[in-house]
Image (cartoon, rainbow, N blue to C red):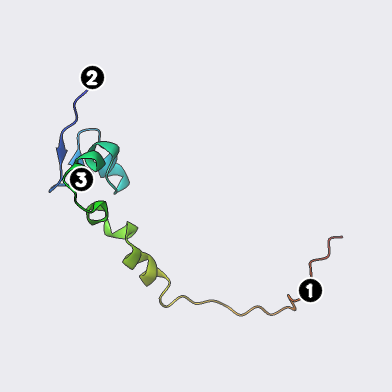
Amino acid sequence: MVDYLVDLEARTCSCHAWQSSGYPCGHALAIILALKRNPQLYLKTFFTLESYRKSYEHAILHPLAGDYSQPLVWP
């Protein structure tokens, strides 16, 4: 049996999965849930819903120039 050291404040685990991925590994998640804390608070900001929404807040979508109301015809 292998023991892993989890530091919730530093957001690290001795398996190094948390540090490399940016979200809690299974070892950290088990502790977070046992303490009845919100796991989303331990994510890197990149993975938050707020960051996702901000990435599309001012997106530039170019208009379609063709007539796309008809089905595609394959040669």
Res 18 quadrant in image: top left
User: Vertically, is 54 above or below 8?
Assistant: below
- Left-right relation of 66 to 27: right
Give the image location of residue 42, x and y in percent: 23, 52
Disc 2 target residue: 1
Give the label on residue 32, or none.
3
Q: What residue type is labelled 3?
A: Ile
Give the label on residue 70, or none.
1
User: Vertically, is 58 above or below 15?
Assistant: below
Q: Distance between the residues labelled 3 and 2?
A: 21 Å
Mark nearest the camera among 1 and 3 is 3
Estimate how packed mark 1 is, as few (under 14), some (14 to 19) or many (20 or more) residues with alpha carbons within 10 Å.
few
The residue drawn where x is 27% and y is 55% is 40
Q: Which of 65 and 42 is in front in this view?
A: 42
The residue drawn where x is 84% and y is 61% is 74
The residue drawn where x is 32% and y is 45% is 21
Q: Which quarter of the rendering shows the N terminus?
A: top left
Mark nearest the camera among 3 and 2 is 3
